[in-house]
Image (cartoon, rainbow, N blue to C red):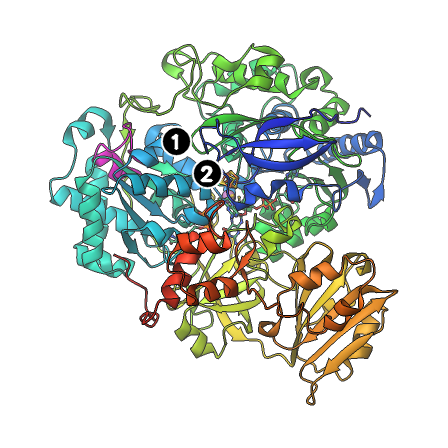
């Protein structure tokens, strides 16, 4: 097999593989390694900025922990064997049970070229419509909302619109943590334009509230009431743009009448949304009186059983006020994954066919099968949509789909109703997984494992949230046997007999075909908005040199299109945008006396999804080191749980264990848990285990934001922190994982394990020796045995370190971590081992600034010694001076430490 090649030396311009902002990255290579990364000053998404995840990219690379070779049935095999076996077994399934028993589940983290060939193979050549993607859990409602309103999945706005707006409304978006560079851009724009206002609509007070002029802490799931109320209010106060409505839209009367029916008075809406009526009306007034409004929405809107309706309730208000197609205006769905947009463009959702054509698009089936030359094949293209993600796993569970190929996503973690998804995976006769890392919750279910190249190795394109296509450029040789996803798919296709259609030698040829398809017979009445034919036929050099560009790119717009719908002509049959009548619906997952708390799930600043990449950079583990449960003080008191203690959430589907964080940022009756932790990192910390798989009837997107749970305290006999040298950890599950709670925190030269259990340990020293096979070399115990510190040293090298007692008593761990690197501990260090720190060194507390690793305790100390501003803290400690993501946290610490700071409020803080 040809080895995927290393492509470069020197400085390489590429794109960040995390969020949908799509920042340009300049990577510096030396002797085959990426030694540094910085923001690309010329990239229009970020102009040189990067967030903390972006700046740590090079720390996540390296062969350690990567999948080395293909595996079939648990055994390492050659690529030839793996590819032949994959093709043979897929074919056997089709022969025995039919094309429709074969499915693929893809990801917004594939490159467009990977996505294109996967879609072409499954829909075009294997004849199955069952190819869906994790974008179903993410962007499906936004896509459906745009299509219903504009006739195409087309984000009208761009990032400059955010800067040019006079009012920016963040709805269900924690921009500060999840699209940090865009947040920084917004913040700078607001500083430059004192008239600009920002409104945050979110049940939680998030870090994004740092720049909010008005915060509406709404009842989860009530957004459609709020925006219906806005439409009715605009009508009642003569704030409609009737010229725009008449000239460019249809459906207004029905939309208004539905809005009026659900809304009632401002007071009624305020009750439905559980917000203060005056503040609500302030928002209505601001929105209605400003033309340049951007409403930026994300998962707090999309991940809902009425997500599509919520998107349309927002779009309705923009259409009714003529607030789109202008600089600084529009309904802006912000994309999550780096290439969720690219996936949408190739047709990677089960209801799409290809290149923004759906199954029901007139003439599309014929057009696509002529373009792909599949007419001679039996059977031809499927003629109706396939199963959307949740339906797909249900169909697998029922035994209707018997072969599944998963690429670049982890449904064993990220799908709701986790137990059912895992049962389906276990039942499925053929599971093929293309993956980069060796340890995920999905891999144990795989019959065939295909090692894929990752960021820094792959070559292709991605499209960001503002429709901007950028190149991701390969720089390194993939470790072991790993190969590029597009190559793997094409090699399997060739072995299935489709060599002619899949004989690409480089991704540029795939991109070229994709670009040609987008422009193929794309004119006249059946004109499709997605058209990048202007990028076709340019050859590899142009592809390699491609500068970031926004689609459409064609004859009419050779330099791309920054903003859509400027002429007020939409992609619908009659060119008019549609307002939709919306009847608000509350979450399907209902609260009950058994499950009385509303569950909210989402992201933390320094982690990416299932942590397969961000957990490889130890400094990203310190901001939130363990799975947690964030809740209001009153709920904590009611359940008898204490801050930093351990608690359990239960739902009909499963359970979740995490550390308690009591916070006034939560509304009473609601808990927030992160989506990131998996069985690889903790005992029982998967949020998907708590969610029911209810979906939106239009988009099929699951309701991942609104579960129903009960909270119980986990009363533990002991808690302990164990640090173990990396080499000391055997493969498989360590023996201490039998504890009622464990959480693994990679640290560099060692791993930190937080442990707790209900059964007392009578002899700690014997227990640890049994766990690790290395006896304690030094220890000290208090008289009650409730506190103990011990360490195991072999031939002068530290092998493990243990503290029994609450983790709040831990010293700062950086000093200890460094000791695991010592070839031989010197006497002074050995004497300090049990203290866990050097003379005078104190615990810096949880890390607030990840870039400069500045802890909370250090910051508080600086504030107490006189620093009164973020700038002063930055000058003294450097915190907040690089990516800026921690500035909201610095501000809250300053606020908390301010002399005479008012006691924290116990109800939803009012921010205006
Ligand atoms: N650090 C980091 N950044 C990321 C990612 C990551 O894993 N880590 N993932 C990327 C991806 S794929 C995505 S999709 C984006 C997601 O980006 P966001 O959508 O910003 O992320 P979430 O934290 O899932 O949810 C956003 C907010 O929705 C709020 N919310 C919950 N219910 C409701 C409701 O009923 N109404 C309203 N108005 N708000 C509600 C939550 O409290 C939360 O603050 O982030 C991207 N960026
Ligand atoms: N409870 C809850 N659940 C959620 C959400 C939520 O807010 N709450 N959010 C949902 C959303 S918006 C999203 S986007 C999903 C994300 O959820 P997932 O997509 O399941 O999460 P990732 O960890 O990004 O999974 C990507 C996998 O692909 C691997 N990988 C990375 N790059 C490549 C590559 O180039 N090729 C291959 N073959 N593999 C690669 C990674 O190692 C990783 O295992 O989670 C969804 N689930
Ligand atoms: S904002 Fe998003 S794209 Fe930009 S550096 Fe951070 S994670 Fe990467
Ligand atoms: Mo997402």
Q: How many marks?
A: 2
SS under mark 1: loop
Q: Which residue is mark 1?
A: 155
Quarter location, residue 864? bottom left
CA gap between label 1 and label 2 equals 10 Å
Give the residue at x 37% y 43%.
297
Q: Residue 525, percent across and down? A: 36, 14
Looking at the picture, does residue 88 appear above or below residue 881? above
Q: Residue 572, percent across and down? A: 33, 24
SS under mark 2: loop
Q: Which residue is mark 2?
A: 335
Q: Residue 187, percent across and down? A: 36, 43
User: Which stretch is magenta?
Assistant: 315-330
Looking at the picture, does residue 101 appear above or below residue 559? below
Q: Cβ(mark 2) to ligand 1 < 8 Å?
A: yes
Give the residue at x 25% y 43%.
194
């Amino acid at each position: 097999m040809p080895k995927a090649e290393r492509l470069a030396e020197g400085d390489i311009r590429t794109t960040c593989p995390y969020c949908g902002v799509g920042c340009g990255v300049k990577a510096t290579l030396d002797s085959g390694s990426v030694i540094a990364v910085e923001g690309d000053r010329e990239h229009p998404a970020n102009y040189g900025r990067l967030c903390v995840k972006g700046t740590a990219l090079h720390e996540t690379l390296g062969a350690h922990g990567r999948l080395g070779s293909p595996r079939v049935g648990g055994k390492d095999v050659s690529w030839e064997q793996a590819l032949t076996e994959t093709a043979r077994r897929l074919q056997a399934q089709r022969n025995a049970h039919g094309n429709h028993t074969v499915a693929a589940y893809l990801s917004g983290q594939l490159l467009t070229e990977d996505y294109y060939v996967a879609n072409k193979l499954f829909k075009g050549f294997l004849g199955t419509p069952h190819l869906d993607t994790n974008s179903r859990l993410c962007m499906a409602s936004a896509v459906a909302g745009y299509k219903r309103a504009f006739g195409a999945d087309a984000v009208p706005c761009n990032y400059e619109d955010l800067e040019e707006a006079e009012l920016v409304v963040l709805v269900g978006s924690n921009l500060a943590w999840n699209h940090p560079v865009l947040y920084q851009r917004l913040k700078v724009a607001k500083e430059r334009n004192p008239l600009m206002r920002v409104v945050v609509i979110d049940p939680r007070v998030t870090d994004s509230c740092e720049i909010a002029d008005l915060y509406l802490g709404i009842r989860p799931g009530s957004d459609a009431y709020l925006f219906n109320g806005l439409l009715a209010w605009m009508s009642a106060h003569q704030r409609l743009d009737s010229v725009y409505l008449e000239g460019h839209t249809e459906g207004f009367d029905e939309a208004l009448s539905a809005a009026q029916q659900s809304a009632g008075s401002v007071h009624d809406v305020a009750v439905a949304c559980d917000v203060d009526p005056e503040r609500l009306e302030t928002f209505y007034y601001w929105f209605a009186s400003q033309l340049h409004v951007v409403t930026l929405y994300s998962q707090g809107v999309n991940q809902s059983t009425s997500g599509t309706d919520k998107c349309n309730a927002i779009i309705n208000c923009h259409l009714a006020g003529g607030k789109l197609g202008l600089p600084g205006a529009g309904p802006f769905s912000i994309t999550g994954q780096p290439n969720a947009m690219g996936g949408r463009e190739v047709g990677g959702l089960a209801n799409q066919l290809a290149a923004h054509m759906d199954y029901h698009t007139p003439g599309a089936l014929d057009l696509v099968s002529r373009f792909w030359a599949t007419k001679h094949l039996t059977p031809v293209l499927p003629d109706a949509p396939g199963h959307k993600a949740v339906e797909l796993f249900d169909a697998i569970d029922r035994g209707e789909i018997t072969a599944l190929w998963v690429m670049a996503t982890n449904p064993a973690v990220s799908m709701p109703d986790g137990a059912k998804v895992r049962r389906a995976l276990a039942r499925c006769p053929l599971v093929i997984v293309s993956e980069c890392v060796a340890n995920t919750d999905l891999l144990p279910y795989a019959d065939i494992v295909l090692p894929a190249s990752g960021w820094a190795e792959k070559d292709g394109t991605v499209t960001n949230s503002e429709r901007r296509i950028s190149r991701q450029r390969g720089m390194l040789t993939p470790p072991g046997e790993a190969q590029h996803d597009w190559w793997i798919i094409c090699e399997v296709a060739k072995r299935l007999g489709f060599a002619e259609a899949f004989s690409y030698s480089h991704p540029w040829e795939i991109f070229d075909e994709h670009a040609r398809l987008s422009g193929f017979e794309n004119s006249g009445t059946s004109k499709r908005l997605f058209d990048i034919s202007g990028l076709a036929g340019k050859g590899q050099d142009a592809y390699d040199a491609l500068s970031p560009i926004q689609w459409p790119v064609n004859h009419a717009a050779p330099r791309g299109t920054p903003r859509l719908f400027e002429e007020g002509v939409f992609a619908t049959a009659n060119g008019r945008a549609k307002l939709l009548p919306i009847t608000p619906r509350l979450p399907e997952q209902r609260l009950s006396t058994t499950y009385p708390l509303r569950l909210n799930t989402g992201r933390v600043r320094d982690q990416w999804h299932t942590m397969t990449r961000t957990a490889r950079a130890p400094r990203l583990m310190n901001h939130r080191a363990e799975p947690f449960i964030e809740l209001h003080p009153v709920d904590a008191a009611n359940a008898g749980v204490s801050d930093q203690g351990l608690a359990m959430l239960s739902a009909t589907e499963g359970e979740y264990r995490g550390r308690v964080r009591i916070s006034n940022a939560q509304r009473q009756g609601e808990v927030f848990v992160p989506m990131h932790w998996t069985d690889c990192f903790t005992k029982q910390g998967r949020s998907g285990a708590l969610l029911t798989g209810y979906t939106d009837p239009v988009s099929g997107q699951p309701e991942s934001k609104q579960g129903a749970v009960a909270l119980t305290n986990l009363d533990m006999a002991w808690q302990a922190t164990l640090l173990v040298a990396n080499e000391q950890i055997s493969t498989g599950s360590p023996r201490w994982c039998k504890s009622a709670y464990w959480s693994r925190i990679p640290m560099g030269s060692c791993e930190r394990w937080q442990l707790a259990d209900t059964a007392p340990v009578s002899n700690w020293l014997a227990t640890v020796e049994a766990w690790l096979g290395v006896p304690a070399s030094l220890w000290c115990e208090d008289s009650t045995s409730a506190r103990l510190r011990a360490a195991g040293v072999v031939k002068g090298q530290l092998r493990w370190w243990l503290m029994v007692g609450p983790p709040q008593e831990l010293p700062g761990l950086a000093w200890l971590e460094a000791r695991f690197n010592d070839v031989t501990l010197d006497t002074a260090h050995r004497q300090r081992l049990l203290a866990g720190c050097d003379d005078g060194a104190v615990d810096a507390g949880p890390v607030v600034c990840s870039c400069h690793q500045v802890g909370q305790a250090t910051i508080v100390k600086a504030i107490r010694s006189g620093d009164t501003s973020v700038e002063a803290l930055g000058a003294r400690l450097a915190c907040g001076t690089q990516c800026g993501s921690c500035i909201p946290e610095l501000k809250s610490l300053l606020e908390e430490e301010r002399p005479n700071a008012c006691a924290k409020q116990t109800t939803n803080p009012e921010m205006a």
